[in-house]
Image (tube, rainbow, N blue to C red):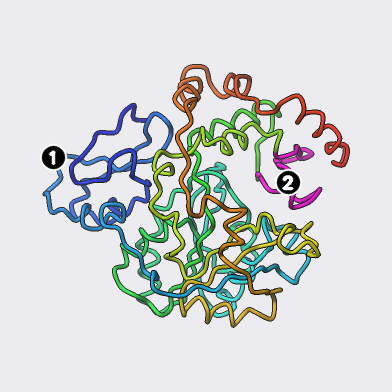
């Protein structure tokens, strides 16, 4: 891990760079490499001996050259969920994404999204079989490494294969920038983003729980609905061991994320928090739906869908029969998803948080930032009684 990332006049600075890696993929002289900084976030670093100063990295950077693809389209907004109750229960929200993914796969296409790899690191990968859709489903709450998929996606598009890419707003814009042309066979699905936590911090978290349990982790579900969508749990699945299930509010990792301690610096001044969206379709949780539509049973999850392009409209029309759809308003969605439009301030504790982790490790970090107040612990003790016993 690099202690410091050297600044370059050709690249976005450390406060703005999203780590998308599009510059790494476009460099003709292989003068760029991707390294992790002291907070565990990935950044491009230029090798001065190889760099020819062609400025390709600067020209393609979506932060330096802000690009909005669908900014003139009048969006449609929907309350939605998957009519298949099993898929809905096992998804983070209302289970809309599996329907989109299965439709693409049924048409001999490919779907790209974030998965846990064999080392429990989060990367973007490709699936071509419906049995693997579950790997892409579920919120991962860590920055995914997407640097290896750009060329693969372009190759498939040039071969006239249908491709669906699921990712965050910054990732989708970087991919559009790399492709530099419109493809009729390319669809993008954007997930509502609160910010991305450090991948190396996440790795430390995984290793800590593996050491505590004496077993390897095979999956982490940060949004388990064993109680309900509105009261999610963290379920850590081990090989040959009963899962660790705790209320999400009792998970220190999620507490750090909620207070913005662990998120990337660029997330504090994200340029994609706006009503105009780049993706064909945007998906997220319809938080606050009980105030807008009190008669809706939200226990198993409710999604919000934005249709941001004609292509997105066409895709939704093809799968509409598998979804509950009800027209809604952007102004209602914002009431429970304020970070779609608004950035948050850098917490004063953030530097101390990362310094504690670097000096003393994840165990000490959990002790110093456990998360819950006494009142919350009492409330959670009652809720915890609803969880299955090991």
Give whichever of 284, 202 is nearer the camera.
284
Quarter of the figure with residue 131: bottom right
Q: Is residue 357 above or below residue 43?
A: above
Which region shows up in magenta?
220-248
Circle 1 packing at 10 Å, graded few (<14), some (14-19), many (20+), is: few
User: Any mark on residue 49, and which?
Assistant: 1
- The residue shown at (79%, 39%) is 242
Circle 2 packing at 10 Å, graded few (<14), some (14-19), many (20+), is: some
How far apart are labels 2 and 1 at the CA level? Answer: 51 Å
Residue 228 on the magenta segment: yes
- The residue shown at (22%, 53%) is 57
Upstream in sequence: badge 2 or badge 1 = 1
Left or right, residue 266 beside residue 44: right
Quarter of the figure with residue 324: bottom right
Q: Position of residue 253 (x, y in %)?
A: 61, 34
Name the residue tied to disc 2. Answer: 232
Q: Position of residue 273 (x, y in %)?
A: 45, 54
Disc 2 vs disc 1: Cβ atoms closer than 8 Å?
no
Number of the front mark, 2 or 1: 2
Main SS of the magenta part reads strand
Q: Position of residue 214 (x, y in %)?
A: 69, 28
């Amino acid at each position: 891990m690099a202690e410091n990332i050297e600044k370059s006049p050709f690249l976005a600075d450390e406060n703005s760079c999203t780590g998308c890696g599009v510059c790494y993929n476009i460099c003709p002289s292989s003068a760029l490499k991707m390294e992790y900084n002291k907070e565990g976030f990935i950044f491009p670093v230029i090798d001065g001996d190889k760099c020819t100063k062609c400025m390709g990295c600067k020209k393609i950077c979506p932060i330096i050259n802000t690009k909005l693809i669908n900014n003139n389209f009048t969006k449609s907004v929907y309350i939605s969920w998957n009519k298949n109750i099993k898929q809905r229960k096992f998804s983070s929200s209302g289970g809309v994404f599996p329907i989109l993914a299965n439709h693409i796969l049924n048409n001999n296409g490919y779907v790209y999204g974030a998965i846990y790899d064999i080392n429990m690191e989060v990367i973007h990968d490709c699936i071509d079989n419906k049995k693997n859709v579950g790997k892409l489903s579920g919120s991962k709450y860590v920055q995914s490494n997407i640097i290896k998929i750009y060329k693969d996606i372009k190759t498939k598009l040039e071969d006239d294969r249908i491709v669906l890419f699921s990712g965050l707003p910054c990732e989708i814009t970087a991919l559009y920038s790399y492709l530099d042309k419109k493809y009729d066979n390319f669809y993008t699905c954007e997930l509502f983003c609160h910010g991305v936590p450090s991948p190396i911090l996440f790795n430390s978290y995984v290793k800590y729980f593996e050491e505590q349990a004496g077993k390897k982790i095979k999956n982490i579900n940060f949004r388990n609905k064993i109680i309900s969508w509105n009261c999610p749990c963290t379920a850590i699945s081990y090989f040959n061991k009963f899962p660790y299930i705790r209320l999400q509010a009792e998970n220190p990792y999620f507490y750090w994320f909620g207070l913005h301690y662990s998120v990337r610096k660029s997330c504090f001044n994200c340029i994609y928090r706006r009503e105009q969206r780049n993706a064909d379709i945007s998906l997220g949780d319809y938080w606050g739906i009980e105030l807008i539509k009190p008669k809706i049973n939200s226990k198993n999850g409710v999604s919000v869908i934005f249709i941001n392009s004609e292509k997105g409209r066409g895709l939704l029309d093809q799968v509409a029969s598998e979804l509950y759809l009800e027209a809604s308003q952007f102004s209602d969605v914002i009431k429970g998803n304020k970070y779609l439009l608004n950035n948050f301030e850098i917490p004063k504790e953030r530097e101390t948080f990362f310094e504690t982790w670097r000096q003393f490790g994840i165990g000490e970090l959990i002790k110093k930032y456990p998360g819950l107040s006494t009142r919350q612990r009492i409330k959670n003790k009652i809720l915890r009684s609803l969880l299955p016993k090991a």
